[in-house]
Image (cartoon, helix red, strand yellow):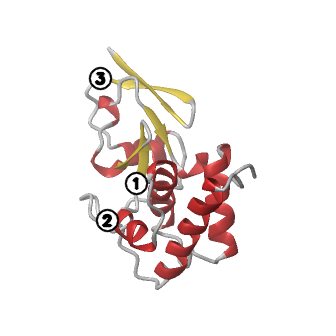
Amino acid sequence: MNVRFSVNGRPCEVAQGERCSLVDYLRDELMLRGTRYGCGQERCGACVVLVDGAPRPACQVEAGHLQDRSIATVESLDSSAEGRMLLAQFERLQAGQCGFCLSGILMRSLAFVRESADGSPAAIARALDDHLCRCGAQPRIVAAVQASWQALREGAGAL
């Protein structure tokens, strides 16, 4: 029996119970290289994708257990107003430095701007707390997420 799910709106199918992590499936089978493999233990946040809209570490999700799920990766950001806003604000504020952890941060930020009622720097910092970023761009990352959150609440999200 096969498991069917979608990645960025594209139908996918794997054998039920297949022991392949979602991050490996994305990178090796679908050639979606934006999702990074970091620690492999859910601790760094580099591999975060959205599973049915919720942030999940792709290193610990098995592709064979995703029946009827919808996966969104960093490659999908351009397909929504919130994603385009995040990309624009991250670029405007130069919020990425080395870029290794950025795809996971962007995906968790997308979930945050869609769902959070509190766009304060403290709330953003809490939401991104599971991401390890050593480059020093954290103040710019928080500013970019806050600017996106604010612009979307003011109706400027139609980029």
State the residue lying farthest toward the bottom.
136
Residue at 46% across, 63% down: 105
Q: Tell me where residue 37 sits by quadrant.
A: bottom left
Tell whether 27 sits left or right of 3: right
Q: Amino acid at mark 1?
A: Val
Q: Are discs 2 and 1 less than 8 Å apart at CB? A: yes
Res. 48 mark: 1
Mark 2 or mark 3: name the one nearer the start of the chain. 3
Q: Which residue is mark 2?
A: 130
The residue wearing badge 3 is: 16
Q: CA distance from mark 1 to mark 3?
A: 22 Å
Q: Quadrant of residue 79?
A: top right
Q: CA distance from mark 2 to mark 3?
A: 30 Å
Q: Residue 34 location, x and y as percent?
A: 53, 56
Residue at the far right: name it: 159
Q: Nearer the viewer, residue 156 or 145?
A: 156
| Image position of 43 (left or right of 117) | left
Q: Quadrant of the N terminus?
A: top left
Q: Nearer the viewer, mark 1 or mark 3?
A: 1
Given this view, does label 2 or label 3 mark the residue nearer the observer?
2
Q: Is residue 21 left or right of residue 140?
A: left
Q: Secondary structure at mark 3?
A: loop
Q: Amino acid at mark 2?
A: Asp
Task: Give 14 or 152, whichever is nearer the viewer.
Answer: 152
In what element is the residue under mark 2? loop
Task: Estimate the x, y position of residue 5 in percent, counting from the top left.
Answer: 44, 26
Q: Position of residue 97 (x, y in %)?
A: 55, 79
